[in-house]
Amino acid sequence: MTAVVSVVSAPWPAPVASGPLDAVVELPGSKSLSARALVTAAVADGPTTLHGALRSRDTELMRAALTTLGARFEELPDESGGCADAALRVTPAPRPFPTRADGDAVARIDCGLAGTVMRFIPPLAALADAPVVFDGDAAARRRPLAPLLEALAALGAEVEYLGEPGFLPVRVGPGDGALLRPADPARPDLPHQAGVDASGSSQFLSALLLVGCLLPGGLAVTPSGPVPSLPHVAMTVEFLRGRGVTVDEPAPDAPVGARTWTVHPGTPQGGTLVIEPDLSNAGPFLAAALVAGGRVGVRRWPGGTTQAGDAWRWLLPRLGGAVEEAPAADGSLTLTAVGTGELHGIDADLSAVGELTPTVAALAALASAQGHASRLRGIGHLRGHETDRLAALEAEINRVGGRAHQTADGLEIAALHAGARLRPARLRAYADHRMATFAAVVGLGVPGIEVDDIACTAKTLPDFPALWTSLLTDQEAR
């Protein structure tokens, strides 16, 4: 199979909306759910068949990483009744994970710029038969990793930094095998104990939860501070439970620093799983209706979900749109955003749904030209994403004539003076897929916008340029 890779493209002229939209889109599977599905399938008690799993650079890197640990993947004809991608059969890896399959050479895993690979796979490497070296794109070497690696080292794993401490590249291995033994030989039922500072990324907590069931006695994890993007942790918990793993969550009112998630020992079940469409990736398409006016619907929207993107239901009305839901025969919905081109500013705490910030910021920037100010709060952790998203959003909004500035935990976008307009510019994507789609949304309402690297959207949505153009030209993207 040919892997999906990110290739820097020539500047892309962002299409401008020429009138109200009337379109319906169908998007591929959720990146977050696909990553969790691939990891749990690779360590399951038997084969797993995945329907609708995302095919993108991030998920191809995840598959390559899990293949290095001994899992096997086979494409099957799609029989899922409408899922976008072919079915995928996953044969789990034996344990300990056989990284020595190709001889004595040290196994190496390319993380690219995928946070799920650089966070979810090192804990598995601690259960391998030999150390594994992790590295990635230049920008990946600036993404925070130290809290997870420190937690693994405290549990007995081997962690050796090969560059700047706390960042890629790093070598992770089983050490003296402490994670393969009970935490207390006299009480083999007791879980291993881990603390982690997950304030920089909820993925640090999810990474430990995903490996916890494989440890003798399981694993109890206590974050030392606040955890952003808690819906992603809930997604991890529900995913494990759906595969037969028992997970105890802390009480909702438990104080910060005293909240413990406990994963009981057990092997995730194999079987068949259908992946929901990516609701975060739905955001730019739904936002298009608010900018251009008209209607844009997203098919197969789940009636109940742990995805952060479900927050578009309440965010879009606050930004000037409306949301309609129409049930489908399979129990899902078509969720439709309706807009008039009149946008509102917003004051919102986005700490739980930080990945939606770039699209919200695009709408807020356009709203500023209509006289509305916005304040986005609780998103200081975005400084450690694919790029420093707060700095990037500040720079790009100001590049088009907006008035944005960072705060300690977010971004403020001031209203422009009467008669002021946003101006054309070539916007930078910073190799960040969500900054590229931010620019595309701005371009709907500002003629002359170009994006320096639209190809980086292949990280989570390889067909974005074609889908976006079809949204505006054919009025229906399929």
Image (cartoon, rainbow, N blue to C red):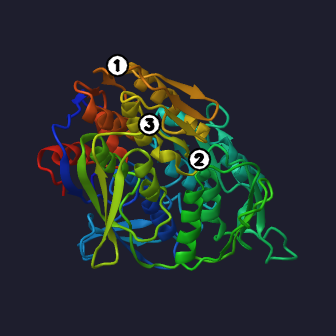
Residue depicted at 40% across the width and 50% down the height? 316
Tag on residue 214?
none
Q: State the residue position of label 3.
A: 361
Q: Amino acid at mark 3?
A: Ala
Q: Residue at x 67, y 41 (%)?
A: 146
**Dot 2 or dot 3, earlier in sequence:** 2
Label count reads 3
The residue pinned by badge 1 equals: 420
Instruction: Determine whether, in the image, residue 345 is placed left or right of residue 171.
Output: left
Answer yes or no: do the residues labelled 2 and 3 have beta carbons within 8 Å? Answer: no
Q: Identify the secondary structure beneath mark 1.
A: loop
Disc 3 crowd rating (10 Å Cα; few below 14, some 14-19, many 20+) is: many
Q: The disc labelled 1 sits on which kind of residue?
A: Ala
Across and down, in percent, residue 60 comes to 37, 53
Between the residue at mark 2 and the residue at mark 1, the CA separation in whole angstroms equals 31 Å
Q: Outermost residue toward the right? A: 186
List the residue tagged with mark 2.
351
Q: Considering only order in the chain, which callout, 1 or 3, is on the residue closer to the N terminus? A: 3
Find numbered disc 2 in the image and state the secondary structure of the residue it sits on: helix
From where the camera sits, is residue 401 visible? yes
Q: Quarter of the image containing the N terminus?
A: bottom left
User: In the rendered structure, which disc, 2 or 1, sits on the residue that comes first in sequence?
Assistant: 2
The three-letter code of the residue at mark 2 reads Ser
Vertical order, 50 against 431 (above or below): below
Between 13 and 220, which is closer to the camera in this rendering?
13
Q: Quadrant of the C terminus?
A: bottom left
Helix, strand or loop status at disc 3? helix
> Percent from the top left, x then y, of residue 35?
46, 59
The answer to the question of whether label 2 and label 1 lie on touching residues, with beta carbons closer than 8 A, is: no
Which of 33 and 472 lies nearest the eye of the viewer?
Answer: 472
Q: Is residue 126 visible in the rendered structure shown here?
A: no
Foreground mark, 3 or 1?
A: 1
